[in-house]
Each structure stands twice: as structure tokens, then as C-alpha cells.
Amino acid sequence: MKINVLTLFPDMFTPLQTSMLGRGLEDGKWDLNLINFRDFTTDFHHHVDDTPYGGGAGMVLQIMPIQKALDSLKNKGRVIITAPQGKTFTQQTAQSWSKEETLTFICGHYEGFDERIYQLADEVVSIGDYVLTGGELPTMSMIDATVRLLPGILGNAASPVDESFAQGLLEYPQYTRPEEFNGMKVPSVLTSGNHQKIDRWRRKEALRATYLRRPDMLANYQLNKEETTMLAEIKEEETN
Ligand code: ADE
């Protein structure tokens, strides 16, 4: 997968070149192309923004440098603008984007985009209902969530399937050594060696975590017969 990022701050993108994603870059599993759209300005001072028509505070990003930066790309693929007014990015978005050959992100900064810039994009996406100073951190989050789903990025190929959101539930709790720490014990079922029981416990605890912390997710989840029984048990246990 090739990812282009149009940004005024290419130096911010070191986190994506670290750890597992960094190794993936070195191994050629994906490619990151950072483009500073200030390089596409034509005026002496290299302005990328100007005051808003109609007056008001702040500056607005101009369309011309962004359009030129996009035009310089041989293949843009899916063009994404990150902005708080976009639709919310989810695990499903990451899954769908991970099947694309090329993605191009446009990161805003300052007060906002000239409205005509939105016409250059296939979608406008937000990472949540809060406002950041720029699109760089949202873009990095979205790239991380997408690229980690590509084959060969994570060490354990099975892990993206089990994790939170992939199945519509939060993840079950995990433990490692020591078996007891400051009086806190690992649930005995996990050391029992009974894999059928462990499997049931994990499915039930994933349901419990979702029921307690994200009931909104549970409302959209189709429970099977055994899960219906488990949820009844959980409700009983949690009221006691
Ligand atoms: N730019 C500023 N805030 C943002 C947000 N919440 N999501 C995406 N892009 C943004």
C-alpha cells in the first residue's frame, strides 16, 4: 500500500516510522510519501492561507497549493481530508481502507479549509468530536489503524481478528506472569488447562467488558443463543 500525505509539517510523522510500522516501511510492506504543500506555492512568501471572505477571525487554507500538490501525484488513489466535520473513523473504515492500493491524506492546519477543497476529496473523516490544531495527529492515527491490518505488519497474524471492535465486542482481559501480584490473582480458569472452559470464559468476559463499558456497541451486536445465556448470567452477577 502506498500512502501520500499532504501536510505543512512532514517532520511530525516520525511516529509512523517507528516500531512495527517502521519495520513494515523498511521491509517494503507499505510506503509513506510526505509532501509539503507549501512547496507548491508560487508567491514570494510561500503563503498557503489567507483571510476569510466576509471577515472573521483566523486564516483559511487556500485551494491552489493543495490542488497543485495533488496534481503532482501520479496515483492519488482514495483522497481523504481529515476534519472535525467529517464522518467518524471506525475499525470498519480502517478495514475498508486496508484493501486500497493507494491512499492520499490532506491535513489541514489553522482555522480551516476553503470550502472548495472538499471537492478534491473522496471523503472527509474525523477521529472524534473534539478539535485538534491540525489534521496530522488524526491522519497518523488513521494510518496506524489501517496499516497494522496489512499482511506481515503485526507479528501474530491472528491478532487483528480477535481484538476489540473486530468482532463487534471489546477484547477479553489478558494476564501474564506472575500468577499473583499484591494479592491480585489471575482467574483460575486460565491456569486450568481446560481449553473449552477458557474459551467460554473469554467470550463471556468480552461480553461483560462490552456490557459494562460500551453498552452502545452491545445494542448493535447480534447475540447467539449461548451469548444470550452468558449475558443473562453477567446481568445477574453484576447486580449482586
Ligand atoms: N482536525 C482537527 N480536528 C480533527 C478531528 N477531530 N478529526 C480529524 N481531523 C481533525
Image (spheres, grey):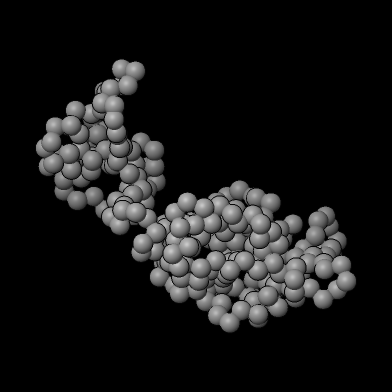
Q: Say whether residue 151 is left or right of residue 240.
A: right
Residue 227 seen: yes
Where residue 14 sits, quadrant-wise, is bottom right
> What quarter of the picture does the C terminus occupy?
top left
Q: Please tell me whether residue 165 is drawn above or below residue 114 in the rendered image.
A: above
Q: How far across and down, in percent of the image, does residue 206 sit?
A: 29, 42
Q: Please tell me whether residue 201 is drawn above or below residue 181 in the rendered image.
A: below
Residue at (46, 70) in percent of width and height: 1
Q: Say whether residue 236 is left or right of residue 130.
A: left
Q: How far across and down, in percent of the image, does residue 72 sit?
A: 65, 80
Q: Say whether residue 86 is left or right of residue 29.
A: right
Residue at (29, 30) in percent of width and height: 177
Residue at (26, 53) in percent of width and height: 222
Residue at (51, 60) in percent of width and height: 143
Q: Nearer the viewer, residue 133 or 219?
A: 133
Where residue 236 sits, quadrant-wise, is top left
Q: How far across and down, in percent of the image, does residue 230 sit?
A: 20, 39
Q: How far across and down, in percent of the image, does residue 212 sit?
A: 35, 36
Q: Please tell me whether residue 172 is drawn above or below residue 160 in the rendered image.
A: above
Q: Nearer the viewer, residue 235 or 160?
A: 160
Residue 142 seen: no
Where residue 194 sits, quadrant-wise, is top left
Q: Say whether residue 139 is left or right of residue 113.
A: left
